[in-house]
Amino acid sequence: MHNPHIANLRPAPPLEVDHWFNTPQALRWDSLRGKVVALHAFQMLCPGCVAHGLPQASRMHEVFAKDPLAVVGLHTVFEHHDVMQPRAALAAFIHEYRLRFPIGIDRPDPHGGPVPLTMQALGLRGTPSLIVLDKRGRIRLHQFGRSDDLQVGALLGELLAEPDEDESADCDDQGCRLPESISAGARS
Amino acid sequence: MHNPHIANLRPAPPLEVDHWFNTPQALRWDSLRGKVVALHAFQMLCPGCVAHGLPQASRMHEVFAKDPLAVVGLHTVFEHHDVMQPRAALAAFIHEYRLRFPIGIDRPDPHGGPVPLTMQALGLRGTPSLIVLDKRGRIRLHQFGRSDDLQVGALLGELLAEPDEDESADCDDQGCRLPESISAGARS
Amino acid sequence: MHNPHIANLRPAPPLEVDHWFNTPQALRWDSLRGKVVALHAFQMLCPGCVAHGLPQASRMHEVFAKDPLAVVGLHTVFEHHDVMQPRAALAAFIHEYRLRFPIGIDRPDPHGGPVPLTMQALGLRGTPSLIVLDKRGRIRLHQFGRSDDLQVGALLGELLAEPDEDESADCDDQGCRLPESISAGARS
Amino acid sequence: MHNPHIANLRPAPPLEVDHWFNTPQALRWDSLRGKVVALHAFQMLCPGCVAHGLPQASRMHEVFAKDPLAVVGLHTVFEHHDVMQPRAALAAFIHEYRLRFPIGIDRPDPHGGPVPLTMQALGLRGTPSLIVLDKRGRIRLHQFGRSDDLQVGALLGELLAEPDEDESADCDDQGCRLPESISAGARS
């Protein structure tokens, strides 16, 4: 199904975003806890993003509309900065391509490097890239290039079926811990 | 994701098959227990099967090759019996379309009706139809027409992630039962 | 545009056909004189024919409905004779795939060879093949495999724009002859 | 084939272009005389142009590379001027989408209207639009929206097969005129 060696269980680094479209307030991983997240990194002038990545993201947004899945776009400009940086250009692009899910602009490197901050922190190789987080915010897929619908669908189905973190004890071969919500409450 | 009202939890009725291709021995639901099953019902002369259903089945067979998923084809002839019934025609079709997964010929109605026996028992509305069984052999999807890759993928991912029936106590709001394998052993 | 070296100007050999579908009477090249002819050779169990060749033929039949273009299918069985030879199977295929243009069954080799007679005479390499005749019945395209719509369209546009043979003197580097209709009349 | 009522025989109005890509010198209809011209009007942020119009133009450019056909793009910005007007954005777009044929930027209306000058003069309804000129520079197709490959191919094949204007007397129901090249020479 999905390739386990391309997933690692580190938590996703913080979203560094300058401006959001299609959402009244900025997204943070914290506020998405309990949801599976499909993060599509793209650029307006990337043909593979326009032909495959963004249509796939839009279909996900429709197909899983009633499920606890958040589809999030991230405009990660690492080339042609002069023409893709202007916010108005992305606004027109989102309008014309009828993209309905929240989309953020990855924050440019303050030191002047070409790769923006979230893209750096995620270690993306290019666009399109698809990052999938489980309900606890851990990276479960980290894929560059075209993603297969059956494979991505299977991963999403598996992650959506996982229990919410508060619903179950957190067990592994070390033992079982109280859910964070409970233990946090106990500490306070 | 998948539409719960099109699934019901009755067990799949027995496969009534006259001849199998691509498998050394006849398939039975019993022998597939512990696997998720994707059953594609098709006819050679059904354009939607040739254009969508069978290519999807072949991709499933590749994408989930390492997972406990069995892709099974069922040739359910309910029209043009004279030309689709001959076994040699289906053999040539399977060869030319490079279908690699097990495919059975649904047994004709002994009373001379047009609809073959497994198709009757499953209550299929036509071809292509996709039936998905969980690891316990219960029907979880029963869909006529074209199936969306993201949706089907999500269902398969969910079902593949379910525990095997022998691995867990069988709990619901009535209580928890011993797994069938254990209780069956206890009875013997 | 079209590749001149794959065309030669020999006249098409006679159609050797056992049975016709979608036409009240047998087709002969003679009766198609004055029309451009697109002859699609196919087999029911040829995936490339079903996916590309036959849909292209059907679109031609629609797009050029008002032009002097005859789209003709030829079922040239050179393998799986036992299952593709029966006329009833082809009838069901034509019905299910909604093929509307005339289709003939190429006559089997009376000496028992696998390749039927028209296919032999045309020197086809396999299926799908597309043969295009100009208004005088001369072969202008002889192509095996998938044909590009822009290229085929361009050839048809060129041939449709050629004058009918009766409208012009027949000139080449040997000189100019009277049109056949006139000279035939003069002989009688 | 092609619809005669969408063609009219007026000559194409002059190209009003501010900047050209993929050509060392500005294109003028005069310099394209003797060639069939396929003019694709598009905008970078037009999904139908990116998905259909521009790929069709690129395929034409390849398929008819040895024929007297000029494929020309025209960036006709009539909306989102702020983000599509900058020349650098179009340069990056042309680079990323690997467009190889000459492309001009339609000149903005000096009176501040939204529709640029060539687009106004041609009376285009939107993008994508395909305008086809014959070897004499007369408009033979004027089509808004998606163009069918077989139909466009047929028109191009017909026009490519027309004689060059210098090769033939220019005859119509008014009589026959000397070719312009000859009569121009006679006048000088």
Image (cartoon, coloured by chain):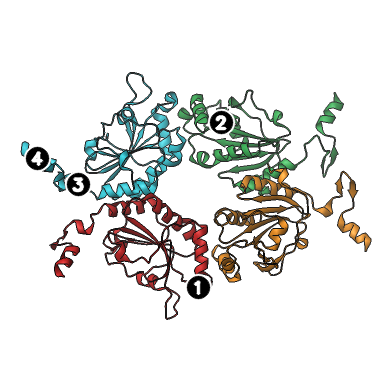
Chain colours: A cyan, B red, C orange, D green
A45 or B169, nearer to the observer = B169
Q: How many marks?
A: 4
Q: Residue furthest bottom?
A: B111
Same chain for the residues under marks 1 and 3 in the image: no
Which amino acid is tagged 2?
Pro
Q: Which residue is mark 3?
A: A164
What is the distance, in whole Å, between disc 2 and disc 3 at their CAs? 56 Å
Q: Which residue is mark 2?
A: D116
What is the distance, in whole Å, between disc 4 and disc 2 at their CAs? 66 Å
* Mark carried by residue B81: 1
C20 or D39, nearer to the observer = C20
Cβ atoms under marks 4 and 2 closer than 8 Å:
no
Q: Which numbered disc, 1 or 3, marks the residue closer to the eye?
A: 1
Which amino acid is tagged 4?
Ser
Q: Which numbered disc, 4 or 2, marks the residue closer to the eye?
A: 4
Q: Residue C65, percent across and down?
A: 66, 57
Decide: few, some or many residues near mark 2? Use Cα within 10 Å; few <14, some 14-19, many ≥20.
many
Query: Is residue C68 at all visible to an observer of this figure?
Result: no
C73 or D57, nearer to the observer = C73
Decide: few, some or many residues near mark 4? Use Cα within 10 Å; few <14, some 14-19, many ≥20.
few
Cβ atoms under marks 4 and 1 closer than 8 Å:
no
Chain at numbered mark 3: A
